[in-house]
Image: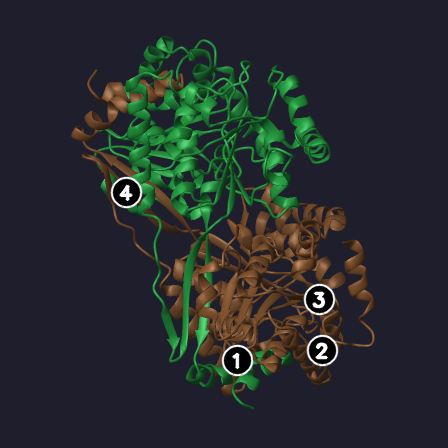
Chain colours: A green, B brown
C-alpha cells in the first residue's frame, strides 16, 4: 500500500488531476484499509517542543506570551489584548456589504444552533422515582481562532454563537497578533456581533497553555475549542490528558469526499474538490464515482479551473496527493465513504435521497448538485468545526451540545423509596457494598 | 495548603469521623482552590508500564492477552471468551430474587435512557436553505467491566443499555477472568438481559489495547467505555491521544458531596458518606453544612455505623482522608459545591427546591432526604458512569448521547443558492479562499 501512495505522489508533475486512481473491486481489504488511513498523530515529533512551550507559560505567564509573540509573530506587544474600543476602531474599516455578509452568516448559524437547546421531560421510572436531565452551560470556555496565512473570522462565528446560545459565563478568545499588533477587521467585527469585549493576542501552543493554566492576563477555562496547526493540536491533546480542561476534538488536515454518478456536474465536482484542496497541501479531496466518464471529465475540469486560483500551487499539490475511486453503484460508494468517515461528504447526485439513510460515518453532509461544501463552511447554518481523520466514526461536530453539560437529577418520594429499596438492597449486597445497602435500608425505616 | 491536607491525615487514628474540618469563611482563595483540587494524573508514573502493555498487545495479539491473564489474573485460559452457552450456564446459578432485582434495574435504566433518543426538526435558515441533524449510532463500541475486589454487574447495565438503545452494531465486552477462567454469574445474567452473546476475558490495560487495535479474537472498536483502575485509565488516555478510537471520559476515584442543613437526618448523611467511602481509600466523602451541630451529629453517626461494615477498614481510611466544610447558608454551600464540581451531589435538605437552579457543576444530583446516591448507582434509571475529579465542569455522564454521533445535513434548492450565494462569495473572498467562492458562483450560473 505504501507503494500505491508513492505512485500517486509521483504523478504530481505535470498536473493531470487527481493523483491516484483506484477501482474499488480491485482493492484488497488491506489496501482499502491503507487507502482510508490518515495519520492521526502527525505531530508526535513536536511533542517535546510543545511540552516546553506549556512549561514556559506555566512558569512565566504573560512574560512567556510576550516573548513568544516576539519570536513567532514578529511583534513586540505592549499588552496582551485588544479592548472594546480598539476592536470597534478596527471593525469600522469594513465595507457595508462585508458587514452584511457577516451578519447574514451570523443569523443563519444562530437560527440553526438555537434549535439545539432543548429542555427534557421528567421520567417516572417507578411510582415515586423521578429522573430527568437539565442542561447547564460550561462556565468558562476558550475559543482559539487561528491567524497565519488564512485568517478565519468564520471560525469565531462557528464557536462564538453556540457558546452564546449555551449561556457560557465567560468566553475567552485567543488569536495570534498580526505584525501590526492587532487582529484583522473581520474578526473584530464578529466580536461585536457576539458581544465579546476583548480578544487576547496569543497564538499557537502558547495560547492553548494560557487558556488551560491561566496567566496574569488570560483567564483559565474549562474547555478549549478551535482548529489550529500541528502545534496547537498537540497542545490540546496534551492538555486534555494532563488537566481537567476538556477540548472539543482533535483536529487534522481538512478533507472532502464527493460521491458522483451520471447525474453529477463535473464542473461543480471539480470546484468542490479544489475548495477543499486550497486549504493546504495536506488536504484530501476524494472523488468516489460510479462513472469513469465523470472521473475523466472532473479531472479535465480540475485542469481548467486550477490555473485561475490565487492558491493554485497549494491546491494543485493537494489534488495530486488525492485520488479517485471507481465503484459499481451508489451502495458501494457509501460503503467506501463510511469506511473513510469523511469530515465533509458531498452527495453530488440527483439520487441523494436513496442513499442518505446509508450514511453512518461523516461530519457534515451536502445533498444534491446545488449544495457545495462552501455554503456550510460559512453560512448555511451548520457548524464547520467537524471531525477529520476518520474521527467521524465516534465524534460529532461542534454544536450547542459541546458547550453544555447534561446533569442527571433524581428525586424519590416516601412511596418511591419503598418501591425501589428492595431492588437496591439486593444489588448492593450482590456487589458486596453494604454501606450502599444501609443508605437505603435506613430510609426504608429499617 | 499542603499543611492542611497533612493535618487531616494525621487524625485518622483513632477514628473520629471526617478527618478534616474547615470553615468556608476562614479559607483564602488559594486554600479553597487547593481544597477542591484532585490529582488528575495520578497514574503518570505508570505510563511506561502501560505503553509496554499496549506495544505487546499490538505485536503479539491474543498471545499477549493469554500471557497477561496468566501473569495478572493467575489463570491459564484455553480461549479468550465465554460464549452464549457458557454464559447461560453461569447465569442459571442465580437466585430468582437476584434475577428480579437485575431485571428491575434493567427496566428502570432502559425507561430513562430511551427518552434520550430524539429526532430533530429541519430548519430552513433562509428560503431554500434547509439544515438538520440526524443521529447515527457509533458502529463498534467496547465496554470495559472491571473485575477485582468488587465485581460490578451494574456497570454492564449502565453501559450496555444506552449502547443497545443507540443501536450500536457491535458491542464488545471485556472483563478480567476470575481464577476459574469465568466471569461471575451476575455479569453473565446481565449479558442475557442485553442480548450480548459473548464476553471477552481480558482485563486491565491489555483489554483497552485489544479493543483499540484488535487482536485475532477481540475486534477493534471506535469508542471505549468504562471505569477501571489507574492502568485502565492511563491506557484509555493514551489510546485517545494516539488513535482515532475515542473514550467516554477519564476516570478518577469516586466522590460524593453532601449538602446538609438543620432539616437533614445525620444518620442518612453518615450512611451516604460511608457508601462512597467503602469504594476505596482514595474515595472522597465531603460534607458541606450550614450547621455545626449537624456536622457533629454526622461524625457521631459515622462512628456508630462504621464498625458494622464488612469494608470498615477501607471506608474508615477514606472518611479520615475526607473533610467537612461549615458554611453560612445554602447559597454558600452551592458556591463551594460548584467549585468542587462533584461526581455525586446529594442535597440532603427539605429546601432542595430553592437551590437546584444554582447547580452548575455536578455529575448526578440526589434531591431531598429520601434520595440516597445508591439508588442512582443501581436502579433509579440514571447512569452511574459520571465525571469525577472536577471533570464535571466540562463533561457530562454517560448517556445515549455518548453512543451516537449527530451528523449535520444541508440541502439547497435552486432558489436557495441564489439567496445564500452572494453572502458566501463575499465571505470566501474575505478569507482569501477563491475556490470556495467558485464552488458557489458556478452553481449560481455565473
Residue underneath mark 2 = B311
Circle 4/circle 2 CB separation < 8 Å: no
Query: Image check: A25 left or right of A53?
Result: left
Between marks 3 and 1 in the image, the one whose residue lies nearer the viewer: 3
- Out of B381 and B391, give the one closest to the viewer: B391
Q: x%, y% of residue B391? A: 58, 53
The quadrant of the rendering that contains the C terminus of chain A is: bottom right
Pointer 3 local density, CA inside 10 Å: few below 14, some 14–19, many at least 20: many
Q: x%, y% of residue B262? A: 56, 76
Between marks 4 and 3 in the image, the one whose residue lies nearer the viewer: 3
Circle 2/circle 3 CB separation < 8 Å: no
Query: Image check: B333 left or right of B60?
Result: left
Compared with B119, B179 (above or below) is below
- Between the C-alphas of marks 4 and 1, the distance is 47 Å
- Between the C-alphas of marks 4 and 3, the distance is 57 Å
Residue underneath mark 3 = B322
Pointer 2 local density, CA inside 10 Å: few below 14, some 14–19, many at least 20: some
Residue that appears at 38% across and 18% down = A92
Residue underneath mark 4 = A355
Pointer 1 local density, CA inside 10 Å: few below 14, some 14–19, many at least 20: many
Query: Label 1 lies in what chain?
Result: A
Compared with A186, B154 (above or below) is below
Query: Image check: B248 left or right of B127?
Result: right
Q: Secondary structure at mark 2?
A: loop
Residue underneath mark 1 = A424
Q: Secondary structure at mark 3?
A: loop
Between marks 4 and 1 in the image, the one whose residue lies nearer the viewer: 1
Circle 4/circle 1 CB separation < 8 Å: no
Residue that appears at 59% across and 27% down = A204
Same chain check for tags 4 and 3? no
Query: Label 2 lies in what chain?
Result: B
Task: Name the disc covering residue B220, or none.
Answer: none
Amino acid at each position: 500500500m505504501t507503494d500505491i501512495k508513492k505512485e500517486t505522489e509521483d504523478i504530481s508533475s505535470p498536473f493531470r488531476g487527481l493523483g491516484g486512481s483506484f477501482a474499488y473491486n480491485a482493492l484488497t481489504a488491506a489496501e482499502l484499509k491503507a487507502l482510508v488511513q490518515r495519520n492521526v498523530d502527525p505531530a508526535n515529533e513536536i511533542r517535546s517542543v510543545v511540552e516546553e512551550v506549556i512549561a514556559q507559560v506555566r512558569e512565566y505567564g504573560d512574560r512567556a506570551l510576550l516573548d513568544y509573540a516576539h519570536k513567532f509573530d514578529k511583534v513586540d506587544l505592549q499588552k496582551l489584548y485588544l479592548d472594546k474600543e480598539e476592536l470597534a476602531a478596527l471593525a469600522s474599516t469594513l465595507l457595508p456589504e462585508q458587514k452584511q455578509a457577516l451578519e447574514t452568516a451570523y443569523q443563519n448559524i444562530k437560527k440553526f444552533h438555537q434549535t439545539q437547546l432543548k429542555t427534557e421531560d421528567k421520567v417516572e421510572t417507578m411510582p415515586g422515582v423521578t429522573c430527568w436531565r437539565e442542561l447547564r452551560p460550561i462556565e468558562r470556555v476558550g475559543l482559539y481562532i487561528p491567524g497565519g496565512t488564512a485568517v478565519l473570522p468564520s471560525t469565531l462565528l462557528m464557536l462564538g454563537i453556540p457558546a452564546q446560545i449555551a449561556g457560557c459565563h465567560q468566553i475567552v478568545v485567543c488569536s495570534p497578533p498580526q505584525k501590526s499588533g492587532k487582529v484583522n477587521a473581520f474578526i473584530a467585527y464578529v466580536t461585536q456581533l457576539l458581544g465579546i469585549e476583548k480578544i487576547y493576542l496569543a497564538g499557537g501552543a502558547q495560547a492553548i497553555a494560557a487558556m488551560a493554566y491561566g496567566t496574569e492576563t488570560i483567564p483559565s477555562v474549562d474547555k478549549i475549542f478551535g482548529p489550529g496547526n500541528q502545534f496547537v493540536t498537540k497542545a490540546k491533546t496534551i492538555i486534555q490528558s494532563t488537566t481537567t480542561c476538556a477540548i472539543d476534538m482533535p483536529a487534522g488536515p481538512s478533507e472532502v469526499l464527493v460521491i458522483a454518478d451520471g447525474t453529477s456536474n463535473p464542473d461543480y465536482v471539480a470546484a468542490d474538490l479544489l475548495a477543499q484542496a486550497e486549504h493546504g497541501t495536506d488536504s484530501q479531496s476524494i472523488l468516489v464515482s460510479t462513472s469513469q466518464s465523470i472521473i475523466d471529465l472532473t479531472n479535465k475540469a480540475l485542469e481548467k479551473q486550477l490555473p485561475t486560483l490565487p492558491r493554485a500551487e497549494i491546491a494543485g499539490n493537494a489534488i495530486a496527493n488525492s485520488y479517485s475511486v471507481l465503484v459499481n453503484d451508489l451502495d458501494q460508494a457509501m460503503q467506501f465513504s463510511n469506511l473513510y468517515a469523511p469530515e465533509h461528504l458531498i452527495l453530488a447526485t440527483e439520487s441523494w435521497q436513496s442513499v442518505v439513510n446509508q450514511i453512518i460515518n461523516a461530519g457534515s453532509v451536502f445533498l444534491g448538485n446545488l449544495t457545495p461544501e462552501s455554503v456550510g463552511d460559512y453560512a448555511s447554518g451548520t457548524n464547520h468545526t467537524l471531525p477529520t481523520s476518520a474521527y467521524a466514526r465516534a465524534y460529532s461536530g461542534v454544536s450547542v451540545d459541546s458547550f453544555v453539560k447534561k446533569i442527571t437529577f433524581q428525586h424519590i418520594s416516601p412511596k418511591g423509596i419503598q418501591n425501589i429499596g428492595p431492588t437496591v438492597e439486593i444489588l448492593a449486597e450482590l456487589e458486596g457494598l453494604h454501606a450502599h445497602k444501609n443508605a437505603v435500608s435506613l430510609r426504608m425505616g429499617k
